[in-house]
Amino acid sequence: MAELSDRMRFPEHCSKPLRPVPPSIDTRYRKPKRFCGHDSEWRKMAVRVGVLGATGAVGQRLIQLLDPHPEFEIAALTASDASAGKTYRQAAKWRVDSPIPSDVADSTVTATDPDEVPDDIDLLFSSLPSSVGAAVEPGFCDAGYVVSSNSSNGRMDDDIPLVIPEVNAEHLDLLEVQRDERGWDGAMVKNPNCSTITFVPTLAALTEFGLEKVHVSTLQAVSGAGYDGVSSMEIIDNAIPYIGGEEDKLETESRKLLGDFDGASLSHNDMAVSASCNRIPTIDGHLENVWVETEDDLTPEAAAEAMREYPSLDLRSSPDPLIHVFEEPDRPQPRMDRTLGDGMAIAAGGLQESPFGLQYNCLAHNTIRGAAGASVLNGELLLENGYI
């Protein structure tokens, strides 16, 4: 793994110490905390941010997370042309499990166009549908805006960093390559698919054992399809053993996330990944069954220890611990465990030996850690590393 750039090093002015890495853990793969906290004296002014696609399910969750955030101030909301000119209260059918923020409710929604967004916006969070994102996100970057995007378009582009900050923060340096190649004054970083985010941190904790083959079967909540994505007649008393395009995302995004960046280009991890994706009638929380074959011997006890000790980051939205490992054989469960770490933690359990290597289950809140919260965390990483 390439040496971290100066931006990625622990700032000298920060008083928080590095978290020690246990001597049994290979430091090439384990990353100690190395960022200043949000209460640093040197950064007191809130960053002005906007939300692209603010009226949708992920856009609403972004607003819920950003409104109380001490580092960010919501200053722009965009949506479709049909919503432009309306107040946010009028444009959005609010469905999030907390009241609509009063200071957001009366804000005017604009069209999703760089000419409609104020020039003093420092960071844009995008929750646009992928087809819309592909059409408009590059225009925002070309206009000088930095975009932290949840949209799936462009995730596998060679020069777009696909980032889970606790796993591959150093991939953010791809932004330098991106700006050189595309001539952008702005920049774009992506977070992975919600189901990818659920299992990749557990794999990152096991890389020291040499990942060779990974099989994952997902049990995905209906909120991942959006409010209108799956009808009640389809999903009640049922399970759907197919989610279009989802398997490919798990199989490709995981290898990019666990790849190595040498300062100029990114090489993907050479592990083999096979995925099967299923929709089930839970509201929130993706549960996944995982089988991992490794080069070195890996016992359930060693895997549990590696997951428990895998460090979080000193960023506001990064939970500590990052991975909560259950001893109970029937955990994690979506209804009981999806809100661990304010919805940003990964839960794991059921670790056992199998004929196909290590077997375990993992869970994450798909609209928080798997979507809006992931974008906010990437925004915090961009801020701490001087990109905004």
Image (spheres, rainbow, N blue to C red):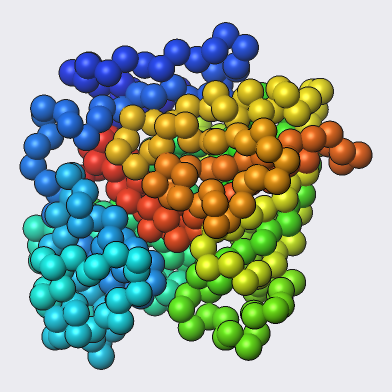
Q: Quadrant of residue 33?
A: top left
Instruction: Answer with left or right where residue 97 lies relative to residue 388.
Output: right
Q: Classify the position of the C terminus by image quarter.
A: top left
How far across and down, in percent of the image, does residue 193 sit?
53, 58
Residue 229 visible: yes
Task: Judge whether 160 appears above or below 325 on screen.
Answer: below
Name the one closer to the observer, 326 or 147: 326
Q: Classify the position of the N terminus by image quarter.
A: top right
Task: Judge whether 16 appears above or below 134 on screen.
Answer: above
Identify the residue at image location x=45%, y=13%: 20
Residue found at the very far right of the displayed protein: 355
How far across and down, in percent of the image, does residue 204 sit?
59, 34
Task: Judge whether 191 appears above or below 154 on screen.
Answer: above
Identify the residue at image location x=51%, y=52%: 338
How far across and down, in percent of the image, does residue 349 sit?
67, 40
Name the one closer to the observer, 80 or 38: 38
Q: In which quarter of the image is residue 241?
A: bottom right
Identify the residue at image location x=46%, y=78%: 227
Name the one closer to the observer, 33 or 106: 106
Instruction: Answer with left or right where residue 149 lies relative to residue 333.
Output: left
Identify the residue at image location x=57%, y=27%: 308
How far across and down, in percent of the image, does residue 375 sit?
37, 53
